[in-house]
Image (cartoon, helix red, strand yellow):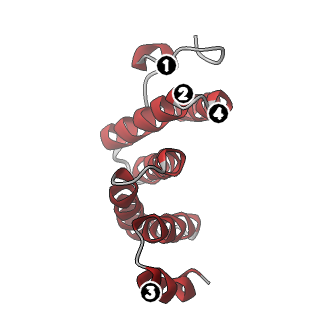
Amino acid sequence: MIDQLAPLSEMVGTEPLRAALAAARGMLLSALGERNEARHALEEAIGLYETGEERYELARARAELAKVLSALGKRAPAMTEASAAAQMFAAMGAALEARRRVARASACRWYAPAWAIGIRGSFGA
């Protein structure tokens, strides 16, 4: 299904659609256990999202990339991406999403707790 959207994304030619397609491909590849391919697709999505205004989607792609990097044993880059995602969620007022990401990442030891990366609010310690 995702591959069927590629021609549409090229025809429409907008960065947000290309980014969404790359993110969907990355998440699917991650679910299938194809982590290296997932990493590349998610990095492409992040690059495209960074040029636009899709902050929530950018944060989700960063959080997914953090999971993939962690699974690949790349702890430092995973920490960087997970921290960036949690900070972005918190900054846009998505406290529930930020709390979920902080809890999940803390349990997996991807990155520092919320207080150590400057996230404040009703969800952090």
Return the residue nearer the eye: 51 or 44.
51
Q: Give the residue at mark 2.
A: 90
First along the sequence among labels 3 and 4: 3
Q: Residue 112 in the image: x percent, y percent?
A: 43, 23
Kind of residue at disc 1: Ile
Q: Give the residue at mark 3.
A: 11
Label 3 secondary element = helix
Cα gap from disc 3 to disc 2, whole angstroms? 35 Å
Q: Quadrant of residue 116?
A: top left
Q: Nearer the viewer, mark 2 or mark 4?
A: 2
Q: Residue at the spot x=37%, y=66% of the render?
A: 36
Label 4 secondary element = helix
First along the sequence among labels 2 and 4: 2
Q: Nearer the viewer, mark 1 or mark 4?
A: 1
Kind of residue at disc 3: Met
Return the residue nearer the eye: 21 or 30.
21
Cα gap from disc 1 to disc 4, whole angstroms? 13 Å
